[in-house]
Amino acid sequence: MTQIEERPATTAAETADKWLAAFNAALEKGDTAAVSELFLETSFWRDLVALTWNLTTAENPDGIRAMLDATLAHSRPRGFRTTEPPTETEGVIEAWIEFETEVGRGNGLLRLRDGKAWTLLTALYELKGHEEPRLDQRPKGTEHGAFRDRETWLDRRVREGDELGYETQPEVLIVGGGQGGIALGARLRQLGVPTIIADKHPRPGDQWRKRYKSLCLHDPIWYDHLPYLKFPENWPVFSPKDKIADWLEMYTRVMELNYWGSTTVTSASYDEDAKEWTVVLEREGHPLTLRPKQLVLATGMSGKPNVPEVPGQDVFRGDQHHSSAHPGPDAYAGKRCVVVGSNNSAFDICGALWEVGADVTMVQRSSTHIARSDSLMDIGLGDLYSERAVRSGITTEKADMIFASLPYRIMHEFQIPLYEQMAERDKEFYDRLEAAGFDHDWGEDGSGLFMKYLRRGSGYYIDVGAADLVADGEVKLANGQVDHLTEDSVVLEDGTELPADLVVFATGYNSMNGWAADLISQEVADKVGKVWGHGSGTRKDPGPWEGEQRNMWKPTQQEGLWFHGGNLHQSRHYSLYLALQLKARAVGIDTPVYGLPEVHHLS
Ligand SMILES: Cc1cc2nc3c(=O)[nH]c(=O)nc-3n(C[C@H](O)[C@H](O)[C@H](O)COP(=O)(O)OP(=O)(O)OC[C@H]3O[C@@H](n4cnc5c(N)ncnc54)[C@H](O)[C@@H]3O)c2cc1C
């Protein structure tokens, strides 16, 4: 019997290197057909600003070829190589990569199946000649020697602060100095882009200080770091609101941001000829006009309250307010409180009111998804954002890239099994909740909380305890729409009357282009269209398919107008790409945008 010679199986590294060699060769030749043939029939190339000056996902060989046909000549991506040994899991090879383009350097993540690309993420991380001054390039901080007219670091900071906005104009004005505006401001500072962050509140962090007193972040610490400066190792897992507020204030100071507190932006208009904005604001009571080239609305996704108009609001004798204006529970001990809504804020507020001994009723208008915090942290986030993840080498930066490498089109497929596990683990809890009459869902396709967040930014609660109060009947539950208020009650459409001393409308927030309507014009708000969601065709995220979050962190239909925000993870990661786009424009790098989406929805 002849012995069959065993050839060593091709390693993940060999397969990845072979693919990358073919990819580099085809790119160099400008052979977009050959590049696209290296991709599977169902495949995705997500580009964050590296080739397209946009956040965009090209799908399948045809879409990838079209993207390259439009972008290859000027972006000239090249030199793709692995940065660490690729790994293989269940037939999928994963390779961390880096590369360069004509104007910058990028990194990313490649997934291969059967020798062809399934997903490719390419992300710009720096512009050539405009690298951030860090590590070996960090500023010296002083000039050794003896100088009579020495300008110290502090002198320079004070001078800059005095001049910017008065004698010199900022390149970028960021409206809103919550964690979003601050993170972006820090990136722009490192990139040397003159920037002012304007916020109505006196101090950075006030957005959090002024929220109800029991509020803690629902996301864990590993998910929440700001750029450049991580929370210390002894920071609580769920940051209490006043701690996060103080961290933001400290961060703003040590990152030397030009943060204008007590400053309200009242109007803005764009001069298409001069390519600059005229922005009217009031700083500590003094009117002022700025002329930035770029205007960023970082005014908060959870910032523009959706306040329903209900007949009888004028006759109701108790207190009534939107959840964003809720002062906390202290004044309501022993009072009858009706909270309209059944998502995060509603649960938080119900829980806090119950803790002070109020008589609390939640009005559920439509179904809500609830994920128990422990299960979500463990099953949903643990592989990427946890101490366990850090120990296994998944840094925050890597976790962000892994997250970003999953195209929205298939992200739900990765989420569904996680929520199936949660349903099993917490079955007893869900049974109790539903037995109490709570209308619970898992998202239209069972993909749970994160997809709901990305699609509509609402419709869920991360349970940190208040759901048990509903399940156990400690917080009473009423189902239905509010019909009207009387002097002392809330009446639902089915006639149910709920006696009330307090009504809280935990009815959510509106699309961020409403901010553009308020500050610029309805015309511009309509021109840029709805912000957030990616066209999944699910409730509150109508199609057609967009493939990326609408208008977030990328060019809009209004030149010079940008939206920034999202949760701490998104603000941290996507502020990099927005900052690079703004820097490129500031230094006159050509930024032809590929795939600027059409507007399909106004709000
Ligand atoms: C109850 C609750 C719990 C939350 N929990 C979490 C969590 O656990 N993790 C998480 O990541 N996110 C959480 N969020 C979402 C949270 O709102 C955002 O993460 C965060 O606040 C968004 O930051 P931002 O900077 O985008 O907006 P915001 O913090 O809302 O800041 C926007 C700022 O814009 C300012 N502004 C608006 N208009 C003007 C104007 N015309 N002129 C000047 N300034 C203006 C406002 O004063 C405000 O300070 C929670 C939200 C709520 C309501």
Image (cartoon, helix red, strand yellow):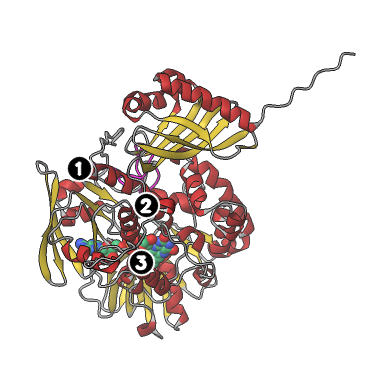
Q: Is residue 467 above or below residue 545?
A: below
Percent across and percent down for residue 579 are 32, 49
Residue at x-position 38% and y-position 33%: 101
Nearer-the-camera pick, 319 or 78: 78
- Sequence-earlier tag: 2 or 1: 2
- Mark 2 residue type: Pro
Q: Is mark 1 within 8 Å of ligand 1?
A: no
Which quadrant of the render holds ligand 1? bottom left
The residue beneath circle 2 is: 133
Residue at x-position 35% and y-position 23%: 69
- Sequence-earlier tag: 3 or 2: 2
Residue at x-position 48% and y-position 54%: 449
**Marks 2 and 1, how far apart at CA:** 29 Å
Magenta residues: mostly which secondary structure?
Answer: loop
The residue beneath circle 3 is: 254
What span is in magenta?
A: 538-558
